[in-house]
Amino acid sequence: MIAGGREAVRSALHMAVLVSIRRKLPLAQTYHRLVSSGKPAKIAIVACMSKLLAILNAFLRDQTPWQNA
């Protein structure tokens, strides 16, 4: 169970990761790699949430917009 952090941010990150996994967006690769290596699905989702938050913080730090590659 995740209990730390702000609930609104945590909920938004969770939904964004779920959409990414279902739509086969970039974070889906990370999720599937973690699950195939034996991690439980919930732990893989939380790891993807953390990765998404790091990506968003980097965008804010560098003041660059999202670019599809």
Image (tube, rainbow, N blue to C red):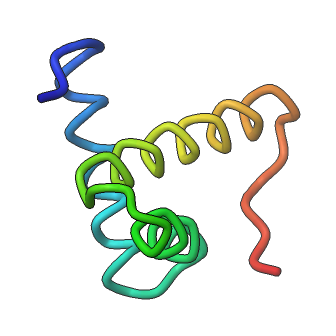
The residue closer to the viewer here, 64 or 47, is 47
Q: Residue at x 82, y 80 (%)?
A: 69
Q: Position of residue 4 (x, y in %)?
A: 25, 12
Left or right: where does residue 22 sit relative to residue 52?
left
Vertical placement of 6 versus 36: above or below?
above
Marks counted in the figure total: 0
Q: Quadrant of residue 53?
A: top right
Left or right: where does residue 43 sit relative to residue 33?
left
Q: Residue at the bottom extreme?
A: 23
Q: Residue at the left extreme?
A: 1
Vertical placement of 10 versus 42: above or below?
above
Q: Residue at x 67, y 44 (%)?
A: 55
Q: Residue at x 52, y 80 (%)?
A: 25
Q: Position of residue 49 (x, y in %)?
A: 43, 44
Q: Quadrant of residue 16?
A: bottom left
Q: Position of residue 34 (x, y in %)?
A: 49, 63
Q: Residue at x 45, y 75 (%)?
A: 36
Q: Position of residue 15 (x, y in %)?
A: 24, 56
- For the N terminus, the quadrant is top left
